[in-house]
Image (cartoon, coloured by chain):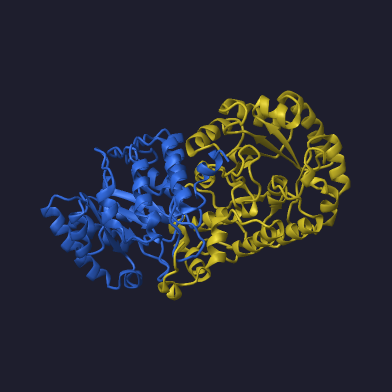
Amino acid sequence: MATVRKALLRRLVGLASLPAVSISSGGTFPKRVKIVEVCPRDGLQNEKMADHAEVLKGIRKFPGTNYPVLTPNFKGYQAAVAAGAKEVAIFGAVSELFTRKNINCSIDESLQQSYEILKAAQAASIPVRGYISCVLGCPYEGKISPAKVAEVAKKLYSMGCYEISLGDTIGVGTPGIMRDMLSAVMHEVPVAALAVHCHDTYGQALANTLMALQMGVSVVDSSVAGLGGCPYAQGASGNLATEDLVYMLTGLGIHTGVNLQKLLEAGAFICQALNRKTSSKVAQATSKL
Amino acid sequence: MGNVPSAVKHCLSYQQLLREHLWIGDSVAGALDPAQESCQLSGLPEYVKIVEVGPRDGLQNEKVIVPTDIKIEFINLLSQTGLSVIEVTSFVSSRWIPQMADHTEVMKGIRQYPGIRYPVLTPNLQGFHRAVAAGATEISVFGAASESFSKKNINCSIEESMERFEEVVKSARHMNIPARGYVSCALGCPCEGSVTPQKVTEVSKRLYGMGCYEISLGDTIGVGTPGSMKKLLESVMKEIPPRALAVHCHDTYGQALANILTALQMGINVVDSAVSGLGGCPYAKGASGNVATEDLIYMLNGLGLNTGVNLYKVMEAGDFICKAVNKTTNSKAAQASFSA
């Protein structure tokens, strides 16, 4: 597995990510969008993750490309730094029940853990990205209030996260709900520090992402080949496919710096290695089969 | 996919989640409640008419030829979902489209519920007369915005096809039968590549001028993106009022819902779709075709827009036809709901 993951990362590199420039005037799109590729973590998370140190040590790190790693607690943070991580990511949640079921503690306790990590990371000049799950709906609590999302986003941002990725973890969101949530969050966190992480469980990911772009968000998370299922609905799909995202952004004239052909090759590689069919429609349409 | 964590057992079932969270299930009658209003984006139409093309455009592009009785049962199921327009079949020669060879039997066999329209495709006068004899009360004609596509698809130039359609639409109007016009390759052509909005506008205007009450702009190979959709609609809307326009988006590159959202934001309120996303793409092997009606309704419900359609019943019809043709649904909403 480590070999496969390393090989995937090798292929994904060279797909440079550029700094985001956000234009928040109503209705116009950003000129550039930064894509945060989450396949090696979020996508492959359903496979065993025990090889994290090996992977991080083994990959070739290209200049200009960031390689963030998830650190759910302080111990994980220390292990990541020991393995050479130069950027880390932490997880916050807006749903008490989801936090309990997922990481076995309350929201406040998890924020406390995050605070410890942020303090240490700041001292070591390691940037920290914050993720918030269930921003558009929770598998346990159902509806989630935009105000609650804004509150957690504000906390993570003020603690020192340079960017907050807002995750529609179970993909239930639709463009209007996305807009309401972002409106609330943008009162507390500047749009340039926001990202969206849409799951495609109900086929809404690209439409939701489009809405976010219309509101000025210029950072989008996605996963090559749309890898990563949904642990809450067996057989359902998960992440937005990077290929389909790049296709839309290119069609909109938005600069991403990503080479779609090379992305398709990386997707084909990992699907073959996992013996999986791609979830990317662009890949399906352009496949030579 | 890995083991489903034990936490899942404590999750709300998806059925419950959707019912509580997204106001789906029974169709919304009357005014939106305050919660829905706050979610409705300003500038979006309040009501969206869905034109269900699964039985025609969907089944036409499936490899399996579906038996007549299955088609009839499928359409009868769709008639009970709240859909107000269901495209039944195509009166085209069985030499070209063997999947639609049973057009007369299907048209005669379905139950025509009051208040629901059942248009059929009629490429020429012969097909039109057969359709009327079989009980059709609404017809559609199919034009293209690409000369090469027109020649390849219906073996004549755009101009020749328009002359044919004039005859059909004139006869239809004479008998008080409404006619809908389709324009294929509105956002790109498998033969010519890019297609100019001006060309699409020209063909649309022609169809509208000859008496088609509605023009459905088809992204036949699904290559369009929100930017090209916007440019197209800006051009067409200079000549044709938005209320007479529809969008027919294919999901070949995963862009359909994003393109539809763009169209809605521009004032379009008629959208074509196919239950279960039936119908592949004849131009890209293994690629998907029509946007799935379930996923479309999911988005519209979430936006607080009224469609009159019951999503669960559509999912049931989708489940029925997928089992009948032995394929997995292309609808993500259906995949998520039936797998929970």
Residue A229 at what x, y percent from top left? 45, 59
Above or below for B309 versus A84: below
> Which residue is at a point 82% across and 31% down the rendered structure image?
B167
Q: Is residue A194 left or right of residue B17?
A: left
> Which residue is at a point 36% across and 42% down the rendered structure image?
A12
Residue with the most extreme right position: B133
Q: Colour of chain A?
A: blue
Q: Is residue B289 left or right of residue A175?
A: right
In the rendered image, which quarter is residue B335 located in?
Answer: bottom right
Depth check: give the residue in front, B146 or A28.
B146
Residue A71 at what x, y percent from top left? 25, 59
Residue B318 at what x, y percent from top left? 65, 59
Depth check: give the residue in front, B106 or A244.
A244
Chain rendered yellow = B
Residue B210 at what x, y percent from top left? 74, 31
Depth check: give the residue in front, B77 or B251.
B251
Depth check: give the residue in front, B286 or B133.
B286
